[in-house]
Structure formats: structure tokens, C-alpha cells
Amino acid sequence: MNEHCDVAIIGAGPAGSIAAALLRKAGHHVVVLEQSHFPRFSIGESLLPQCMEFVEEAGMLDAVNNAGFQFKNGAAFSRNNAPGAFDFTQKFSDGPGTTFQVQRADFDHLLAKQAIAAGADIRFGRRIDGFGYDDTDLPVLNYRDESGDTHTLHSKFVLDASGFGRVLPRLLDLETPSDFPVRRSLFTHVEDNISDDNYDRDKILIVVHPEHKDVWFWLIPFSNGRCSLGVVARQEYFDLDNNDAEVLLKLVVSESPELKRILANAKFDTAVTVLGGYACKVKSLWGKHFALLGNAGEFLDPVFSSGVTIAMKSASLAVPQVNRELAGEDVDWQQSYAAPLQLGINTFRAYVNAWYDGSFQDVIFSYKQQPEVRGMICSILAGYAWDQSNPFVSNPKRLQTVVSLCRE
């Protein structure tokens, strides 16, 4: 069966749904092909305030605000019981200072429903088998439905928002090794039963392992008395050949005095998931009549919850260029999309690298920072990694000056 649309989108996660809603605002016929059925589990549950601007741009702000998600106003850190915290309302950049912590099954489903309400044709249970071009050099996607029937979707442009599925990078041989070490994450959801009065449910908690500075835990509280719990370390840190994933997660959590205390009454009632080698890059974020959004293009690391923000930013940057191309204009995708998107990714990259070598940890747990400098760093942690009025965005190397001062 041959079908036609203006824009085909692969994946109905945050990038795909935001892009679909924005394209529908411009009046385009949009078809979204999603392999899963929603709601479905996903990680990346602690949003950053910058996300709220993209949610509002797509016309979804009221729906998100009214969904009952856990309020979030910052990030808390702990290292050997030494606390550190950033209140996102005290950031340097303009824009929202609060957001939410969400169970992605519900959040992604909500965004997809909003995109459908905006007129996007989202089709679940569709698997992409091939990508090519027709006689007029326009994109063609071949896909299968759940009955095994094959279909052909012709479009004028394709946006790949397939996340870790990385459909077009795989089909077009665009993948290239990441320059990050191979790390692995073990994670689950727990009924937390937290009774610690000092625990702030309005913030994500990031805990550094007491002996290994490059091993860290996340604890993301939800509004229903549950938490997302995970640990990240180099791949060789986990002996999965001789241990069950849940046994390993509980063991490493018990090595942290902070988490052992906070989660003393937690109930582990959900299977532990293992995800490894997730850092990824591509040779190009765009090609002839296609562009890659979010994790389909590049994923750094979960430590500062940048994934959903980068995904939404990519949708916000790409859609105006798609509109221009569909209007017959020439578009320099490298200069108008890839380079601006990469600016923020590189800002996050500098902080991820500094986290793992321990230098940014020394900043977080230092009390020597000037309030103005702390506000600029806070903006990046809040997701405003594209704000070039922030000196720590325009020149990420400034962080090393702060590191030196904090270490004196």
C-alpha cells in the first residue's frame, strides 16, 4: 500500500510528539510511525525547566501542568554525606525555573495524545524496515504493521525521533563511536516508603559512591509514593555474569550510607533493567530530506538529565527548517540546525566530562562560589545550555577556572 504525507516522523516520544504538534500548527499533513504501544516504560524521568518552554511552544503546557506530575525545583547532590543543591529558580537565564519529575510511560503518552489532538496521525505498532528515495528524490519509508503487512509511506521530509532505536543511523550507516567510555546503568522503580524528613521530593537526588567518584546513583521521586532508582558506572564495574541485576543493584545501594538510610523501608517490586553502551554519536545530524532528533542523533549521559531537553530542543530547531524546505526555500541544515543544536550538546558535554573526572563535583560541594557564578552554572543544570548570554555557555572552559578556585 502506497501512502503520502508532508512529513513522516519516526517515533512518538517527546521529540516526535513535539515536532508533530509544531508541524501541525504550520498546517502540514504529519504521519508518525511508532514501534511501541503507549503507555510504555522509558527512562529520562527528571525533566529540566528548559523543557517547559518547548512544551508551551507545542501547545501542551496546560495538559502537562494539570497531569499531577511531581513538582521539581532543582537538583540535590550528596557525596560522603556532604550536601550540595541547586535551586533552579535562582538561575541566571530567563525562562521557567521549575518543571516536573515524570513516569515517562504517562508523560510520553500524554504528549502523544496532545499531538493527536492537534491533528497528527500517530500509528502505533509500526516497524520501519527500509528508507530510500523515489523517482523524484523524495523520501520513502517501508514499514510493517503488527499483522506483518508491508506498507510504503512517501513524504517530502523525514524526522527520525526514534531515540535509542536509532532507525535512520542504523539504516544509513550514520553511526560512529562515542568518545565517552562505555558505561552501564542498572535501574528500577520502587515503592520508596521514605520517612526521612530531610529528603526533598521536589528535587532529583544524585549520590556519589563513597569510594568511586565515577560511580553515582539517581533517586527521582514521583507524586505517587514511588521513585526511580538507578546506578551508573563503567561497564566492568558490574559482574553481571555471576550476579542477578537486582542483587547487584541492592548491593551497590547498600554501599552508600545516604541511600541505605533513605531507602531503608523501600519495596523493590519491579524488575531491574540493565542498559549499557548508551552513549552514541552520528556522522551527520541531517541528510537529503531528513534530520535526526534527540537520542537518534546523539546521547551523552544520564547524569544531568539532559536527554529529553536535547530531544525537545532538536524538535524546536528542526521544525522551522522543515517549514522552510517545504515552502521551497534553500536550507543550510548544518548552519541552521546541526551547529546550533551542537552548541548546547557541547556545553552539556563539558559538564559531563567534568563530573566524571571529579572536578565539577568539587564545584558542587564547594561553598566558595560567588552567587552570580553559581547562578550561571545553575542555568546549565536547568537546561539552558543554548543561552549564549551566559558566559559559561559561550565559553564552557570557564568552568575550569571555577574548579581551580574551589580547589584552592
Image (cartoon, rainbow, N blue to C red):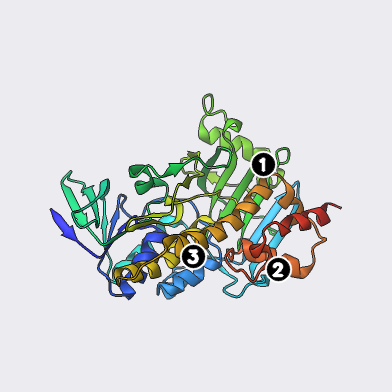
Residue type, mark 3 in image: Phe
**Which residue is rendered at x = 79% and y = 63% of the image?**
369
- Residue 78: % across, % down: 71, 51
**Which residue is rendered at x = 58% and y = 70% of the image?**
98
- Relative to 58, is 292 above or below? above
Residue type, mark 1 in image: Asp
- Residue 84: % across, % down: 73, 57
Earlier sequence position, callout 2 versus callout 1: 1
Kindly indicate the quadrant of the structure image that contains residue 256. top right
Residue denoted by label 3: 69
Q: Which of 27 and 40 lies nearest the eye of the viewer? A: 27
**Which residue is rendered at x = 43% and y = 54% of the image?**
285
**Which residue is rendered at x = 56% and y = 51% of the image?**
192
Report the mark closest to the observer, 3 or 2.
2
Label 3 with label 1: CB-CB less than 8 Å:
no
Q: Is residue 312 visible?
A: no
Left or right of 209: which side holds 382? left
Disc 1 crowd rating (10 Å Cα; few below 14, some 14-19, many 20+) is some
Q: Secondary structure at mark 3?
A: loop
Q: Secondary structure at mark 2?
A: helix
Residue denoted by label 2: 375
Label 3 with label 2: CB-CB less than 8 Å:
no
Q: Secondary structure at mark 1?
A: loop
Earlier sequence position, callout 3 versus callout 2: 3
Label 2 with label 1: CB-CB less than 8 Å:
no
Q: How many angstroms separate mark 3 from mark 1 (CA)?
A: 30 Å
Disc 2 crowd rating (10 Å Cα; few below 14, some 14-19, many 20+) is many
Q: How many angstroms separate mark 2 from mark 1 (CA)?
A: 25 Å
Total labels: the figure holds: 3
- Relative to 93, is 348 above or below? above
Residue denoted by label 1: 214
